[in-house]
Amino acid sequence: MPPKAVFFDLDDTLLWDKKSIELALRFTAEDAERKFGVKADELVASVRALAPSIYEEFPTHAFTKLIGINPFEGLWGEFGEAIHFKFREMGRLMPEYRKRVWTEALKSNGVHDENGGTWLSEQFIAHRKKNPVLYEETLQTLEILQQEGFRLLMLTNGAPSLQLEKLRITPELVPYFEHIVISGNVGVGKPDPAVFDHALRLMDLQASDVWMVGDNRGTDILGANRVNMKSVLIQHDKKEGANSNPSGSPDLVIERLQDIVPLLNQ
């Protein structure tokens, strides 16, 4: 029997966040190449290497893991939400994090310029906001599912301000969903069963009524497993992602979003 609803993850399921980050890094590094004479590719490599380790040094790191906010989101999110003191702490600390990453990346490429690091951190934010990327089949798939009567909910990990900013710059996504559940508003992120239970209460459904579609075994799939919800792993790049987790076992695996349509109707 087909489900009554489908829960979709956002990042790297509907929205190609990794591609947007890749573009923003490249464009910012090209700005640096023109301004400081560094090699763009080498600067990108430095930022990718430095950001995770510097991110871990900040006292908000454990909270970001709980909610699901990665180092590259830290490079452009504003944070500072009033709903939790840790978000307010992130709002205070992330500008320093961003400045450190870009300043140290410049330094590792022979340029000692703190003001340059601040400038590049601002350039990256601007480039990321200008370059949202949806997967080619995202809107078409959502349109078909909506027309066929499936109820849709978005279940995404992250800070409310950041996830809402992603939706602000891709407004065409929003109308398809009855509810948009952001882990930062709930207090825990996927794979914690509590965030799935919250979403089910909003829809007045049981886990058996819903399929979960996402790209991450360790969050989307493991969380669905924990509440006995059918899960579908989307592998856009036809391989496991960096955040794969063998403890998350999908019921189905697809490589294109549109592949979910016939499966739901079987």
Image (cartoon, grey):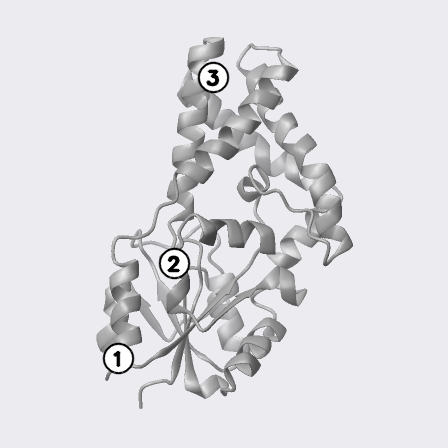
Label whose residue precedes the other's in the sequence (2 or 1): 2
Q: Quadrant of residue 159?
A: bottom right
Alpha-carbon span between mark 1 and mark 3:
49 Å
Tell me the mark number nearer the camera, choosing from 1 and 3. 1
Please tell me which residue lies in front, 66 or 247.
66
Give the residue pinned by disc 2. 13
Q: Amino acid at mark 2?
A: Thr
Classed neighbour count for the residue bearing mark 1: other residues with Cα under 10 Å, few (<14), some (14–19), many (≥20): few
| Secondary structure of residue under mark 3 | helix
Classed neighbour count for the residue bearing mark 3: other residues with Cα under 10 Å, few (<14), some (14–19), many (≥20): many
Q: Percent from the top left, x then y, of residue 230?
A: 41, 79
Q: Amino acid at mark 1?
A: Glu
Q: Amino acid at mark 3?
A: Ala
Give the residue pinned by disc 3. 32
Q: Percent from the top left, x then y, of residue 111?
A: 57, 10
Label whose residue precedes the other's in the sequence (3 or 2): 2
